[in-house]
Structure formats: structure tokens, C-alpha cells
Image (cartoon, helix red, strand yellow):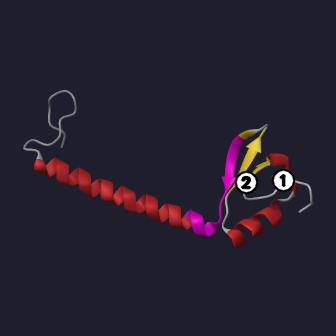
Amino acid sequence: MRSGAPQPGGTVPITWAQANLGALVRWTARTRERTVITNHGIPAAALISAEELAYLEDATLARHQVGEQDSGERRRSMPNGPANGSGRAVP
């Protein structure tokens, strides 16, 4: 990566990311730091390591599974199930 240019781990313009993609990917994999890529100064995407992605996917799945369990427990604790706003029970 050229000196004086934006550095990964913060925010970089899309043109800089495009010109330095290989180095940016290697840096992200090695340091596990996020880099936000902007398009005309507006955040457009983020580059994260594959390890961080796997962690986020696992955490999302776990949170989703806990939510399903909680929802099922609430439904079973209500005599006619939860209401859907119309006053009718939802299966």
C-alpha cells in the first residue's frame, strides 16, 4: 500500500479500496480489523475477516434460536396462545 494513502482499519474511499484490494484483504485477515469502504464519502460496505464473519453468523444463529425458544414458551403460557390484534388466537 502506498504511503500517504488512507490506511485500512478505518474508512477508505472505494477507489482506494479497489486499487489496493489484495493488500486490504490480507491486512484484514491478519489483523481482524474492520474497514469501512465509502462511495462519495458515504459508508457503502465494510470489509471484515472471515473469522469475524463466522463469529457474527454463529452469534446471530444463537440469538435466533433463543428467540424461538422464548416465543414458544410465551405461546404455551397463554391459555389461547398470543393474540394477533384481532382478538383471535394465533396458532
6 or 25, nearer to the observer: 6
**Residue 86 in the image, given as x and y percentages of width and height:** 19, 27
Residue at 77% from the left image edge and 38% from the top image edge: 41
Residues at circles 1 and 2 in contact by the CB criterion of under 8 Å: yes
Residue 51 shown in magenta? yes
Residue pointed to by mark 2: 10
| Image-based side of 53 in relation to 26, left or right | left
Graded by Cα atoms within 10 Å as few (under 14), some (14 to 19) or many (20 or more), the crowding at tag 2 reads few
Residue 72, image x, y percentages:
21, 53
- For the point 31% across and 59% down, the residue is 66
Residue appearing at x 74%, y 49% in the figure: 37
Label 2: state its secondary structure.
loop
Q: Please report the bounds of the magenta region as a residue range.
A: 43-53
Amino acid identity at mark 2: Gly
Classify residue 63 as left or right of residue 89: right
Residue 38: quadrant of the picture: top right
The kind of residue on which mark 1 rests is Pro
Element marked by disc 1: loop
Which image quadrant for residue 87?
Answer: top left
Q: Which residue is mark 1?
A: 6
Q: Residue furthest bottom?
A: 30
Residue furthest left as drawn = 79
Magenta highlight on residue 18 = no
Give the quadrant of the C terminus: top left
Label annotation for residue 42: none
Label 1, label 2: how many angstroms apart (C-alpha)? 8 Å
Vertical comparison of 86 with 55: above or below: above
Quarter containing the N terminus: bottom right
